[in-house]
Image (cartoon, helix red, strand yellow):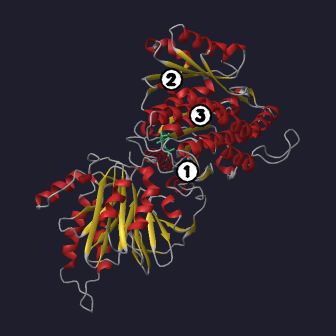
């Protein structure tokens, strides 16, 4: 949550800071601010609301200096008002700090500072940091002069930050400037992301790669506990113990599609339309070329060291939100296709009520951003508790599924499946969901192939069955292309019917139950319409009481194990006057729907890859028709880096 940027070099910093914030605005947009320093002192601008407000303020007032920091906020402590916007300053107004994360012991620190006379101007947890730094700098400054009589500003700022950090509990990434040292910038991170981009004679730090993509391709991701002093001349990197660290930078990849809506009205719509490409890339990378039915080699090429899958007997998946829905589809595949008992947990619940440990367990963390704090914390906890068990059968095996292999998740797990969907800017996940689904198809097929002849939930695992599924997967990119073109038009035409809708029920069963959940989540987050996803058979046990002519029911009904049952459940809703919208193949059986969002008839196990499309487009068009900010819905942020 929140995005931070910091720049030091030999040109005016503010325009680049604002551009960096524009690229990070998906991380929060409650308020934004920048602070620059030059020989004349500190120049701090802040504005409530979206970045455009800050940009207007900058255009009117300016913020000179070749060194500065910036922040875009998702409110945690304190309302989204200007006084709570970052940067925060110390009492003298010479130290400015931006922070992403939560300082958990801020109350204690605030009380201590208040007792010594410090006056706070915001309700944030962050404001304790500039005050602590201000006090520390005052202490350090006394009598510290360089041989030429000048104060060694940068070194002093670094020492102050290093002295203050051990006092901060929680997770944070922060950047600090000091008016007395306009040629220095100090950044630090602990359990929140921060990367340093290396330009020519300048450095740009940011919470995430989109802010760096237009600046440089050479990056140095900071590790946990590290602190860096940046000057136009170079980087000094220190570990938690204050020891100097030397590490080579790496090259940024996959950021070509950054922040370009092309001709689409919103990023979300563009990203929905990019899904055939996501699928085609996945097929090209993971399904070897040999024609189906003739190859003796592996069915799926997964870039994994086989050891992580060797002897796996059960799987636990940790995830949040949309990623968790992808994991639920994945669990269905792993059980029905590969015969591996699989449990999916809310990452935020798992950490505080972990189930008993089982042997030979693969733990998978699913997070498109790779930075979701709940998921990272749950994985870390699982890793730690398994490391304490002497029996090697209980050793941790961690696999990550992410769109950001360079993220904190990527650095934490043993191996990563990169979904390769390209940057997703819309807060509502669409193409990354499809990418996560495909990663699970690959994983389930690879594990099923290792277990040929064994029993899975769906019967004996045979190579023929797996070959048929891989053939079906190859057809998905083209099916998506046609489906998206058709449903984009249909959903747009349908959207006006939802003008006064307040509640929508989504029904699905089996492998499409998570798609019903995903449909409901998409609608809620971008249109603010109350929506619930239910297993279709569960409706009669309570939710049916909600139904009347004002409550549309979206029912996913695809031929397979539960087709007839789902159609009966839809009939039950129709008998209560609900408006029935079917996501189903066009056939005699589906004539009961008032509106049919037709999907092609495919193997039931592959159907979620297609049934999710009408869900995404319907939500999108309903929200766009209502004139809402689809890409930046209220109260949300793209990556949730607080627990
Ligand atoms: C998706 O549309 C949501 N914005 C949200 O539920 C999201 O999936 C969740 O916060 C998890 O994010 P992650 O995949 O980056 O971990």
- Taking the image as drawn, is residue 229 in sight? yes
Task: Give the side of residue 562 with respect to residue 201, left or right.
Answer: right
Seen as rendered, the residue at the extreme top is 575
- Quick one: label 1 or label 3, which is nearer the N terminus? 1
Q: Position of residue 107 (x, y in %)?
A: 21, 51
Please identify, in this view, whether the residue under mark 1 or under mark 3 is nearer the observer. 1
Question: Residue at the location (64% across, 49% down)?
Answer: 308
CA gap, disc 1 and disc 3: 38 Å
User: Mark 2 sits on what residue?
Assistant: 497
Please identify, in this view, whether the residue under mark 3 or under mark 2 is nearer the observer. 2
CA gap, disc 3 and disc 2: 40 Å
Q: Position of residue 425 (x, y in %)?
A: 51, 49
| Image quadrant in which the C terminus is located | top left
- Relative to 638, does residue 621 appear above or below in the rendering? above
- Contact between marks 1 and 2 (CB within 8 A): the answer is no
Question: Residue at the location (73% across, 48% down)?
Answer: 286
Q: Which mark is residue 342?
A: 3
Q: Which mark is residue 261?
A: 1
């Amino acid at each position: 949550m929140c995005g931070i940027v910091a720049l030091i070099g030999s040109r005016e910093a503010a325009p680049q800071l604002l551009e960096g914030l524009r690229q990070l605005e998906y991380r929060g947009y409650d308020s934004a601010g920048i602070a620059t320093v030059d020989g004349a002192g500190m120049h701090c601008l802040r504005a409530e609301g979206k970045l455009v407000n800050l940009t207007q303020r900058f255009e009117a007032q300016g913020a000179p200096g070749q060194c500065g920091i910036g922040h875009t906020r998702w409110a945690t402590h304190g309302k989204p008002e200007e006084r709570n916007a970052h940067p925060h300053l110390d009492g003298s107004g010479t130290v400015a700090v931006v922070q992403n994360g939560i300082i958990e012991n801020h109350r204690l620190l605030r009380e201590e500072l208040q007792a010594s006379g410090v006056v706070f101007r915001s309700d944030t947890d962050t404001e304790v940091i500039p005050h602590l730094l201000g006090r520390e700098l005052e202490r350090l400054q006394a009598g510290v002069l360089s041989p030429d009589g000048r104060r060694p500003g940068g070194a002093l700022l670094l020492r102050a930050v290093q002295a203050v950090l051990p006092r901060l509990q929680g997770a944070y990434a922060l950047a600090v400037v000091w008016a007395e040292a306009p040629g220095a910038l100090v950044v630090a991170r602990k359990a929140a992301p921060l990367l340093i981009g290396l330009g020519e004679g300048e450095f740009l730090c940011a919470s995430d790669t989109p802010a760096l993509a237009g600046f440089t391709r050479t990056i140095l991701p900071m590790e946990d506990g590290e602190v860096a002093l940046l000057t136009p001349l170079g980087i000094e990197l220190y570990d938690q113990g204050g020891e100097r660290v030397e590490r080579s930078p790496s090259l940024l990849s996959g950021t070509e599609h950054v922040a370009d809506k092309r001709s689409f009205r919103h990023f979300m719509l563009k990203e929905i339309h990019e899904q055939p490409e996501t699928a085609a890339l996945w097929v090209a990378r993971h399904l070897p070329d040999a024609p189906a039915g003739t190859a003796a080699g592996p069915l799926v090429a997964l870039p994994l060291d086989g050891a992580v899958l060797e002897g796996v007997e059960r799987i636990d998946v940790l995830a949040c939100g949309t990623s968790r829905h992808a994991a639920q589809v994945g669990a269905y595949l792993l059980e029905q296709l590969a015969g591996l008992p699989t449990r999916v947990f809310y990452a935020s619940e798992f950490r505080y009520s972990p189930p008993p440990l089982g042997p030979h367990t693969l733990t998978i963390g699913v997070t498109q951003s790779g930075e979701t704090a709940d998921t990272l914390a749950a994985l870390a906890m699982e890793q730690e508790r398994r490391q304490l068990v002497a029996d090697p059968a209980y050793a941790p095996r961690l696999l990550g599924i992410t769109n950001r292999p360079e993220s904190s998740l990527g650095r934490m797990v043993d191996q990563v499946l990169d979904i390769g969907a390209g940057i997703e800017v819309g807060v509502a996940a669409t193409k990354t969901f499809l990418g996560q689904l495909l990663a699970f198809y690959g994983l389930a097929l690879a594990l099923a192939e290792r277990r040929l002849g064994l029993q899975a939930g769906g019967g004996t695992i045979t190579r023929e069955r797996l070959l048929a599924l891989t053939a079906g997967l190859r057809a998905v990119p083209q099916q998506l292309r046609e489906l998206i073109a058709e449903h984009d038009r249909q959903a747009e035409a349908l959207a006006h019917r939802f003008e006064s809708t307040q509640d929508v029920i989504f029904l699905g069963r089996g492998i499409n139950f998570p798609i019903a959940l995903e449909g409901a989540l998409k609608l809620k987050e971008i249109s603010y319409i109350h929506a619930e996803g239910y297993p279709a058979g569960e409706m009669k046990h309570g939710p049916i009481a909600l139904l009347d002519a004002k409550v549309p029911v979206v029912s996913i009904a695809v031929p397979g194990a539960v087709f007839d049952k789902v159609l009966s459940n839809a009939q039950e809703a129709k008998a209560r006057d609900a408006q029935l919208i079917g996501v189903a193949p066009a056939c005699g059986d589906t004539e009961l729907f008032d509106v049919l969002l037709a999907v092609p008839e495919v193997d039931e196990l592959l159907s979620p890859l297609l049934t999710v499309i009408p869900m995404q487009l319907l939500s999108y068009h309903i929200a766009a028709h209502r004139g809402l900010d689809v890409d930046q819905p209220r109260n949300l942020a793209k990556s949730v880096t607080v627990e």
